[in-house]
Amino acid sequence: MTFEDFNFTPELCEALAAMGFTQPTPIQEQAIPVILAKRDIIACAQTGTGKTAAFLLPILNAIASNPDRKESINTLVIAPTRELALQIDQQVEGFSYFMGISSIPVYGGGSSTSWDQQKQALKSGADIVIATPGRLIAHLNMGYVKLDHLQHLVLDEADRMLDMGFSDDIAKIVSKLPKQRQNLLFSATMPSKIRSLTSKILKDPVQLNIAISKPAEGVLQGAYLAYDSQKINLIESLLSGKKNYPSIIIFTSTKKMVREITLALKHKKYAVQAISSDLEQKEREQALLDFKSNKTQILVATDILARGIDIKGISLVINYDVPQDAEDYVHRIGRTARADATGVALTFISDKDQARFHNIEQLIKMDILKIPLPKALGEGPVYDPNKRPPRKSFGKHRKKGGGGKRRFTKR
């Protein structure tokens, strides 16, 4: 099958040809006809499968094909992070290059100028608005956002948004939308809370499930058993002389380790930058731009980048620590081997993370190769998948019968 089989408008076909798009990915092949038929959809697809184009292309085609097109917001895409909102907006710009369709990313953390630009676009009616929930609600509360003619609602990375606590925000946004609209929900996982959300928003949706919780086939996975004290030296050993890895991402779970890893690699004269929530938005955007343009070889990041950032050509992903959630492992290593490409993903397993790593192997239904440490680093931990981390002590004076969960009140 090719994109020509979808009978898109000539302008959209021209853009696809210019961008080198010829054959649709499985999620695109299954989702696009359903969306073109104006059905609601709930699609479960892992990162790197091309799901952004799966919903953008039929929406752009519908906008371009409408002779009665109004100067109003036609499509609202809700995304969990500003990085994902920017990525989607960039794809809209590429696909609609010959079509004259307007779009605006709406997210927080910018200057007063960015707020004014967003306000103007929302008032005048950009064709496609890609927004984070909190920032969109801030604009909605001002009373100038007109959604009367909205045709499409897209919830992207829906599971991530619920994990980040956006459930109430999404409900508030949906309450402002016209009842007659097409709803498209894309999620990497499908827990019960997503099912609950879809029952409230979607109408008789078509359900698609594309390779959930499986790393891309092109990812060569490996793991090292290493104590925390060995990990920095292990990174340096792995990167030494590796000129064939032009783009490398190192993931770690804490901002503290992002700083430590970055400083250690800068000391060794590597072209490295850090990215975490500590940075201002402009700094984060510049770090990503430098990485995409190969000015920076190594990006050290927290999980803020694990989903939603479309950077082509990443050759190596290093998990400095094992992700807390087994699903997050799939998203981390999904930064490499995008679509049909290949890549390498290496994970460092400390003695306290072995049970967690075993959960990952069970999830993806494969045993990941354990690679011996370089001899210069000494011996690492012995792999014991049944080993559990020690429990934290809560003191000697715990009252009997106090086995219930503690309740915490939000302030």
Image: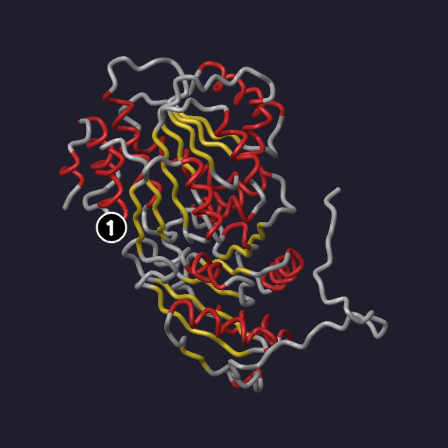
The residue positioned 48% from the left and 71% from the top of the image is 359
Q: Residue at x 47, y 83 (%)?
A: 372
Front-lying residue, 120 or 41? 41
The crowd level at tag 1 (other Cα within 10 Å; few <14, some 14-19, many 20+) is some
Does residue 30 appear to the left or right of 198 in the view shown? Answer: left
Quadrant showing the C terminus: top right
Task: Answer above or below: position of 343 versus 137.
Answer: below
Seen as rendered, the residue at the extreme front is: 401
Relative vertical location of residue 212 with respect to residue 402 in this rendering, above or below: above
Q: Is residue 7 left or right of residue 240?
A: left
Left or right: residue 6 compared with residue 104: left
Where residue 257 appears, x then y in whole percent? 64, 61
Q: Secondary structure at mark 1?
A: helix
Residue sitting at x 54%, y 32%: 107
Q: Foreground: 234 or 302? A: 302
Q: Which three-letter amino acid code belongs to the residue tagged 1?
A: Pro
* Residue 334 % position (x, y): 40, 57
Q: Nearer the viewer, residue 347 or 325?
A: 325
Q: Which residue is mark 1?
A: 26
Residue located 39% across and 66% down the image? 344
